[in-house]
Amino acid sequence: MTELSPTAAQAATQTATQAADIRIAHDDLADLLAQIFERHGCSRTVARILAGNCAGCERDGSFSHGVFRIPGYVGSLKSGWADGKAVPKVEEVGPAFLRVDAANGFAQPALEAARPRLMEMVRAGGMALLAIRDSHHFSALWPDVEPFARDGLVALSVVNSFACVVPHGGRSAVYGTNPMAFASPCASGDPIVFDQAASSMANGDVRIAAREGHALPPGYGVDRDGIPTTDPKAVLDGGALLPFGGHKGSSIAFLIEVLSAALTGGQFSFEVDWSAHPGAETPRTGQLLILIDPARGGNAGFAERVLTLTDRVRAAGQDRMPGDRRHAHRARTEVEGIPLSAAKLAELRALA
Amino acid sequence: MTELSPTAAQAATQTATQAADIRIAHDDLADLLAQIFERHGCSRTVARILAGNCAGCERDGSFSHGVFRIPGYVGSLKSGWADGKAVPKVEEVGPAFLRVDAANGFAQPALEAARPRLMEMVRAGGMALLAIRDSHHFSALWPDVEPFARDGLVALSVVNSFACVVPHGGRSAVYGTNPMAFASPCASGDPIVFDQAASSMANGDVRIAAREGHALPPGYGVDRDGIPTTDPKAVLDGGALLPFGGHKGSSIAFLIEVLSAALTGGQFSFEVDWSAHPGAETPRTGQLLILIDPARGGNAGFAERVLTLTDRVRAAGQDRMPGDRRHAHRARTEVEGIPLSAAKLAELRALA
């Protein structure tokens, strides 16, 4: 649910490039993934949505949420933990407030089911809020917000996951990695999009450090007794991550639990119990999305103003804006195809 | 616009307690402050609102936004930078979207002007959004959100300020301290309320460190050339703070500029130019507020769920929740009165 840090993303890019025996077009990859989802119990609609989302992550270099996630999806479906045929139920609460009961299905089809009415609401009133509950979110969060920014809207979304993050000053995990994603139109073209976990680092980074024998930076994790550690294996073996940025990041993790779960009617991260479903990996929680239409809200010059801000940020020396790397990766793979190893392709075909 | 860190707050508490020659009731302090605001050009309405806000901060131990701020308010008013007689103009954009042109007045009277219609909107539709522009916010942000949580609503607000924070990887200041405040009802009684800057620390903390000759922690500030420094004097002398939590805190500072300024029609922090108004201290920017009614949104058990979460966070070892210290301070000063030194009281009386 969170993008990799630059270090892990670079390592993953390198690995993907070195091992890239073939190049596959986005739509071909999506078709293959859709077959996998259908074969393991998803309806055609759900399979198409999840496959497009996952292929999009692979295309954009979000490798931690690309085909890497397919075995986890399959595990959740095969174990009976998630319902791939669930039909989301959309309820209108107010003129700018939708709720969706995902009915133990995935979050992305719930968002798709709500999208038409959500867009009518935000165009009519200038803003809209979507509360999804009883949903599984196992992808990056940026794909949920970026399309709205391309339609001229500001979008903010949060989702909780499963307990693997210790509150600031605490000893045991309560929060999930709890990402927040934000997308805004920008007059220069591509929107500004960020997607960041409330944890100090991504779980994928911890696994990479353990595999490569690197220590974690101090202040990133605790062991199973809640004692600070720089040993990635101790974090993975019953330990937990700390929030990013000390007590402030911890407050943000708390806010995300409140908005994603308490407010929507979903489960808290610490309530996720998949022990009766071996192989399950997709957290069953909730998600909140807020949309704002700057033009309908009385500010037609909004995208130009965001460009003024990003120009100033770049002039101050920040070399890239959030989303830049993904958009560059997308532009490249749309021409060259998505790199994939022959072994990975064979694995995927065996699942289809 | 941000609360002090524990260290500075403790130092301030100690100073306040040591020097507490007298105790004054909240309403008496508010009356005295209202006289000061009126004498320096505020309308009676504006004076009453700012005085109540400022006395409330002093009462709750938010000393960095209590009477300490009065000379700054007076400087902005005397220099003609802020308009203490401005009448906010409320515009209804949609069924859940209000805008307010604060007309170069203060943000708190703009919020008060919008409040009645805002409450009707959120009760009717389950949520509402308020965008304030051309406003001066010189207080803590928690007083803006806490009252809504006491009315059963979830409230989130952001405000930008003046350039004093360097983007991650940059060398010169672009962002303000850019606080975010969040308040949520909780079934145990007092709401959960946090108010935190996107900067690594409060400006007040830097001043205290400079005065006492302490170094800053590494990674907190840069000097006037953008070089990292632990010297608080170098930060104050043309340098800047860094965001909290590296690139993630930097993204949050960016988000807050977009929502508070680009979206509302207010100025960015780096556009604030008070050079023609010596003595001015109140940033002229914008503010966004989002309100959600959990019960109207279909989740009547919300406050109980938040209590379940906070119980779990405390059980994990976090010794207090955001807002706990302020609420404890308030309970004490409501009985004992607000401590104030005779010298400070004399200063205030001289301004009234």
Image: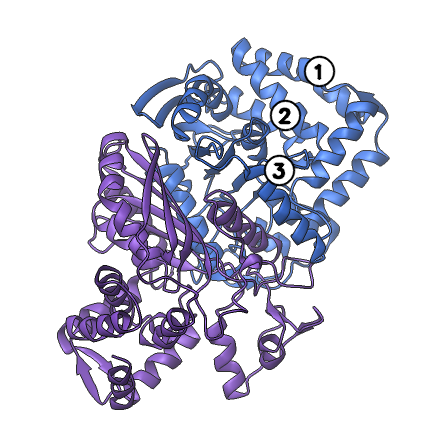
Chain colours: A blue, B purple
Vertically, is B256 above or below A331?
Answer: below
Image coordinates of residue A62 in percent, x first then y, are: 68, 35
Query: Marks 3 and 1: which is nearer the front?
Result: 3
Query: Mark 1: few, some, or many residues within 10 Å (few <14, many ≥20)?
Result: few
Q: In this view, does B30 lie to the left or right of A150?
A: left
Q: Is mark 3 on a helix, strand or loop?
A: loop
Q: Are marks 3 and 1 on the same chain?
A: yes
Q: What element carries label 2?
A: helix
- Please tell me the numbered disc located at residue A54: 2
Vertically, is A20 above or below A197?
Answer: above
Residue drawn at x 45%, y 49% as measured from the top left: A253
**Mark 2 or mark 1: which comes first in sequence?**
1
Distance (Cα) linking label 2 and label 1: 11 Å
Q: Is residue A100 left or right of residue B188?
A: right
- Mark 1 sits on what residue? A27
Residue drawn at x 80%, y 38% as measured from the top left: A15
Q: Residue type at mark 1?
A: Asp
- Please tell me the numbered disc located at residue A186: 3
Vertically, is B346 above or below A234?
Answer: below
Query: Marks 2 and 1: which is nearer the front?
Result: 1
Q: Is mark 1 on a helix, strand or loop?
A: helix
Chain on which label 2 sits: A
Image coordinates of residue B180 in percent, x first then y, are: 43, 54
